[in-house]
Image (cartoon, rainbow, N blue to C red):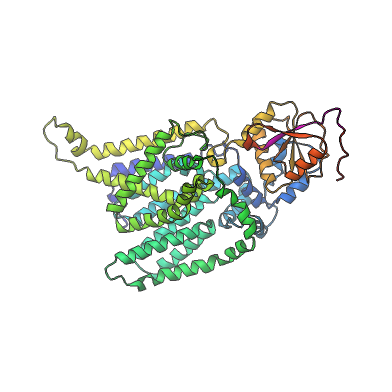
Amino acid sequence: MTDRAMRAPRWLVWGSIGLITIGCLLRFSGLGQFLPWYDELATLQHIAVQSELDLTQLWQGREQVLADLWHSLSTKPQKTTWDMVTSLANHDAHHPPLYYLFVRAWADWFGNTIVSLRTATAIMGVILLASVFWLLRQLSQRPSLPWVGTVLVALSPLQILYAQEAREYVIWLIFFVLSSGFLARSLRHSTWPHWLLYGVTLTLNWYSHLLGGFVLLGHGLWVGVWLWRSGDRNWRRAIPWAIAAVGTLLAISPWIWVLYQVQTQSAASLAWLSQAGPPGIHRWAALRAFAATLWDNQPNLWASFPTATDVPCLLVTLWMIVALVGCWRSGEPLLKGFVLSAVAPFLLLVWLPAIVMDRTMASIIRYQFPLLLGMQVVLANWIVTTCEQITPKPVQEWPQPLSFYLFRWRWMPHCFAALLAILLLVANLNAARARSWQLSWWSKGGTVSVEIAKALKEIDRPLLVMTDIPGYSLSALALSHASDRLKSRGVTVWLAPSFQGLNWPDRPNTFLFSPSPDLRQAIEQRGQRLIPFGTSWWNLWRLQSAPPDRPVPDRPST
């Protein structure tokens, strides 16, 4: 088995190495182009162990330039790693700590900046490619499949996007791939060292993301089907897997207990995933996000629909479905088991219900990454199978009928693979061109902060007032980064620590960002009004002064 890769065609090996190299370089290109968004800023906050209370104490009571606000985050962590884990457990327990432990060690050496953390994730993205290659060697006896599958992952616009994000999704995929590979190896050669490595990687997978529990469920389905299709159906052969699963549950139980302790707060933090929008918007966004595995050229998934740009998305989805059916009908047993474990739990229990109910969860594709990787493996299997079905004939007299050149020509597999490689490169060039002039992308939470910063830049000396409500610091930091990138030095910000803190400077152009109901009521009591500014999803309001003939009540005491 050690020389299996050497039996792959030489042209395929060298071509794949070139394409994988391009994919690795793309993961490190433009790491600072996109503005950091709320989730990435939360990572920076946790690494620096700076809570909203800490930032409030730094910001409140004085007028500051909005573009300078983001400098408040410590570039070098000042507190201990245990402080970071405690902060994560208290405020974001639905994010397990493994990724944060890795990037904390990285930040100690290279600084707690967005480019630094994205570089660490890009390195993980390269490790993922090696892991995928190793996984496919465990799943298939065909020497071409690991090369083709790794190329598809390396040149996927979606995989490149999230390999440049300071979040935990890539490390989750790495341990999902490794645990699946060790499971395949254990099912083929059942030894205790293999099962031990499977249990360790499965535990690390769960400590990377809470949805790792669905990976355990999928692996259980894989083992059950494997036993059912075995000749003797001896269920005792599943005992090692059951022991590994129980060990994983025991290992993750401390963090589950932490999550249980703050379940109300975590449920409130995730409530937005079950929200509905305009009819059909999340279904179309889910289609566009799914197609981004091969084709991604629009900065906003939630734009008007359907459009002409959705045609490639429909074609990619149809291609994936055809490849999935073909894999299930003729794929190798271990390959089909992996696809079943990756696709079934996330499709049936997470993604499909959200699509049917048209909820936000449907369009948040990062929670379906194991499913997407399974579909990329399915597509690689379809490509390899198609090339193998093109059986060349010996060289004959020229010319030959057209059918000979289409189906039986000896160079047809080469031409087919070259065409697919060209299409992948074109898709990446198209995605790179579409992203090249953008400050944000749909994977970064949209362009709201950029739009607000651009609108405020056009106004004479605006004052932006923010109140100390949950999550306000991430919004403030996102707007600060956007203003800094746009070189907007004329916008100032004032933090009102409560609805009673109405003592901000008197400016003709005063705006309030996401005002609380209590603050709105206090402003109305002063005889002033809040007028919506911009689009509704900005949640930005312009303060209108009281009419001259109307007395203004005394300001509430602070």
- State left or right for residue 344 relative to residue 101: left
- Quarter of the view holding residue 241: bottom left
Q: Tell me, yes or no, whether the highlighted magenta stretch contains residue 29.
A: no
Direction bottom: furthest residue: 236
Residue found at the far front of this picture = 549
Front residue of 213/490: it is 213
Q: Is residue 477 visible in the rendered structure shown here? A: yes
Q: Is residue 59 above or below residue 258?
A: above
- Nearer to the camera, 103 or 244: 244
Residue 59 visible from this viewpoint? no
Q: Quadrant for the N terminus, please.
A: bottom left
The answer to which of 182 and 123 lies nearer the viewer is 182
**Number of numbered discs:** 0
* Residue 294 at x, y percent in the picture: 41, 40
Which residue shows up at 47% across the image and 51% down it? 353
> Is 540 included in the stretch rendered in magenta?
yes
The answer to which of 53 and 136 lies nearer the viewer is 53
Q: Is residue 509 above or below residue 524?
A: above
The residue that appears at 25% across and 40% down in the rendered structure is: 413
**Residue 5 image position (x, y, % from top left):** 31, 51
Residue 182, quarter of picture: bottom left
Q: Which residues are magenta?
A: 539-550
Q: Position of residue 370 (x, y in %)?
A: 44, 52
Residue 189 position within the rendered picture, expressed as x and y whole percent measured from the top left = 34, 66
